[in-house]
Image (cartoon, coloured by chain):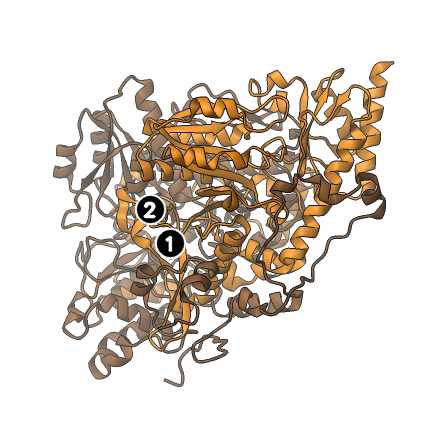
Amino acid sequence: MRYIPNTERKFVNVMLKEVGITDIEDLFSDIPKKLKLSDPPDIGHPLDEPTLYRTAREILSKNITTEEFISFLGGGVWDHYVPAAVDEIVAKQEFYTAYTPYQPEISQGALQAIFEYQSLIAELTGMDVVSASHYDWSTALAEASLMSMRINHRNKCLISMAISPERLSVLKTYLDPLNAKIVPLSYDRETGFVDLEDFERKIDYETCMVYVENPNFFGVIDENVTELADKIHEKGAIFVVGVNAISLGILKPPGEYGADIVVGEGQQLGIYPSFGGPLLGIIATRFDRRYVRQMPGRLIGMTWSKSGARGYVITLQTREQHIRRERATSNITTNESLMAIRVAVYLSLLGKDGLRSLCEKILVNTAYLIKKISSIEGLEVPVFNAKHFQEFLVRSHTRKWSEIQKLLLKKGIFAGIDLNNRFPGYFDDLGQVALFATTELHTKADLDKLIEELGRVMHERSF
Amino acid sequence: MNDLFRQAKWQRERELIEPTVFELSQGRSEGYYRFSIEKEMLDAVGDVQKLIPSKLRREELNLPNLSEPEVVRHFSRLAEMNYGVDSGPYWLGSCTMKYNPKINERIAASPKVRRLHPYQPEETVQGALKIMYELGEMLGKITGLRHWTFQTSAGAHGEYLGCSIIRAYQLDRGEKQRDEMLIPLSAHGSNFASAAMAGFKVIKIPVDSRGCTDMGALRAAAGERTAGMMITNPNTLGIFEEDILEIADLVHNAGGLLYYDGANLNALLGRVLLSAMGVDVAHLNLHKTFSTPHGTGGPGAGAVLVRDGLEDFLPVPVLRERDGRYYFDYNVPKSVGRIKAFYGNFEVLVKAWAYLKALGSTGLREVSGIAVLNANYAFTKIKGIREVSVIYGEDRPRKHEFVISLKEARSKIEAPALHVAKRLLDYGLHPPTIYFPPVVEEAFMMEPTETDSKEEIDHYIEVMRKILEEELEENPKTVLEAPHNSSIDRLDEVRAAREPILSWKIYERYYKGNKT
């Protein structure tokens, strides 16, 4: 086998002799006979490298990519441009083949890169302390909720319903065994903002945490988020804010409106959609002992060497599973470190001005689409009377989105997410709605093509 | 020491190795990277500033201002100060640091993999689904557990899902009182944490002198509150749990399910089915046994597999096939729910698929055979080195890894496992896992894997001998002060925990200009 150097018989014989046996099978003599397979499981013949490449190519050719079709899909994963420099850096073996940096002296590169990731996300979110990464936004939210429960020993979680149902269902899975209660926090049907009356009604001294997203699942920039922190803190509860990380290039960071914990998705910052994984879950918090001590996941810290040189190590490990076992703050071990390095390179490359110009482009695309689609008969946009970032709902009054989607697909367009079909029962009161997303990859021609085809599809119906 | 390894060291000043991106951009006020907006678009939407509410507009954002060559050089220098599997031997026990085949990377980097959105219509992702399905089927054959999910992103994530499935199964049977999870003391730390997160009380089972689960203790612990048991086989001592069938019977007769931690599956690949061992639920680490890279800590992928009868508890959606067409089934009646958004770390799955296609049936046994041979060869030679002792089951064959104790070297230096590990760095060798499992004092847990050559193994053994027999004798200071040849000398981890500097912002606020 081409990956195994010692298969040559003469090496095997020398090694067997040293061990004092004659056959490799002898090394398995302690396994009960009835457990042993006579033949290996049938997974096919080994493929040589060119055959493997061709086989993979043939199978993958059945996929249609967002490079081939114009995609308006978002809702948790977005198709942004990944700068070539990002790919180049994470393709270095020293990064991608390394293990968790448990030996800091020969792992300074990874440690510093992840420290820089933590630092850059701290700046972006307006927080101080950022974990080295979580699996994705949904698991980051789940872990932030568990963290909140450990901090104030309460179990009522007030969760905005303007979030992805996928995220909500992951949260339910994690909270269920711990007897935590999810209390839905509704959104204003006119603006899409957090419903302040509902919030006032439900926040109390039993509330563990309040979770809202900004921009929310519908792309609405929620102007009510600034009204929440004081009332949450007054009740001794924790304010958790979820973000589409890229929006923080232009939107006020949650740290500036009183968030205690920020969670979010970092995939947009230099990571491909890759059919939904790997992604990057963000958890950030304030530099406050109570919070940092309960933080889940790995943390990289700066320190100094014996000779006085500045360096980096994994720190506060007594929170982690390999030391604290069942009393650890989380079971997380393998995380998404290489994705964090992608984000570090991406944010370093773009800088403040690059990120701002990216956000402006997204804002312009969003506004352009909303404006143009609103003039198509049978379609209603925006559904919420609010400013939108990157995403927005389109309501159809005449045709079902499932039909519209099929017709657009024939024209080489992945239309927005059909929320009624994708998440039955969640958004039925909003009517026939689809969630559209745009990124900097869309040119005016791409947007015009969508507008034109949407117009045609809706027009055909009227005759 | 002239013949020793030297790691790159991009030192600027005595106290400063590579500056951070924030330091590199000091004095700059403008960035370099820009996205352009077509004029017609701007004309159509009017004032960009008005597109967001003024009270939520961001004013300050402290990101670096660096050009592309500066960023690329910075991160390239950092890479040079990091040690990967392609750099050399990496005997981290229970981590299975095997070589990551390059063809897997090439395939997974294709736009046909990366530029797919998880909400695309199923007819446009049939290739992706086919790869996932074929991988699931191959893993099903390898384990004998025929139902699977890839939604978990890591081993610990898989353990957590496994525990959730066990919980759901017990609740479904009306066995609400079953709130205990049995875990041997030699288990990975994450097992305990995962069981606790899933709401279980952890019952620890000791290890006997053979290095195996103490059957007496297990018998005493199993009962009507037992929900299940988590077992790693071969265990973290590298020893096959020879009573596995009895263990499975005991757990099953008590009414529990047997969970298998797949971190050590490399030893059994192609030789033993998990189903034959009585396993009900298992996770496999695709980033260990199935060669996908670790990426300085992730992403990984933890496939979770279950036996017939437990498939209704898997997370939604479940991938199925009908007449050559692949689709997601959201109708899973007793599902534990979602464990992560979407379908798993797809890029990682593609790599594991490519690996198994390259191995084929015959390759499976070559992997486990040579991995176990390499480990036993190294074990045989290393246990002959002075200062090395073996605590459990000295005469039993090891599987893919082995654990030695350096406690005898305490007569020469304190904390020998730590210092000898640091000294190995000077020879360009990644040390083993140290101080684990906790049942062995001054533990060195070593796993050469099948991808190290005999020459590399011999070299590792010779360096171990040299350090333990010569350097500790003649020059213990060299060992105590190691490493000498890495990009930085020994770091103060105690200080890092006492004065946590967890971001550049915290450093600037509290510690800048106040270094010692």
Which of B424/A290 is in front?
Answer: A290
At x 27%, y 54%, the residue is B398
Specify whether A366 is left or right of B137: right
Q: Quadrant of residue A436?
A: top right
Pick the quarter of the image with the C terminus of chain B: bottom left
Q: Quadrant of residue A420?
A: top right
Res B315 seen here: no
Report whether B253 appears left or right of B160.
left
Q: Are marks 1 and 2 on the same chain?
A: no
Where is mark 2, residue-wise?
A290
Residue B81 in picture, x, y percent from top left = 48, 70
Q: Cα distance, mark 1 to mark 2?
A: 33 Å
- As drawn, which residue projects farthest toward the bottom? B2
**Element under disc 2:** helix
Seen from the viewer's position, the closer of residues B259 and A313 is: A313
Tell me the chain of label 1: B
In the figure, the shade used to draw chain B is brown
Residue A161 location, x and y as percent?
A: 52, 26
Q: Nearer the viewer, residue B512 or A228?
A: A228
Please rate how many residues cluster around mark 2, counting C-alpha atoms within 10 Å: few if below 14, some from 14 to 19, many from 20: few
* Three-letter code for the amino acid on which mark 2 is drawn: Arg
The image quadrant where one finds the N terminus of chain B is bottom left
Q: Position of residue A447 (x, y in %)?
A: 79, 37
Crowding around mark 1 (Cα neighbors within 10 Å: few <14, some 14 to 19, many 20+) is: many
Chain in orange, by letter, is A
Which residue, given by chain and number where applicable, does mark 1 sit on? B95
Amino acid type for the residue under numbered disc 1:
Cys
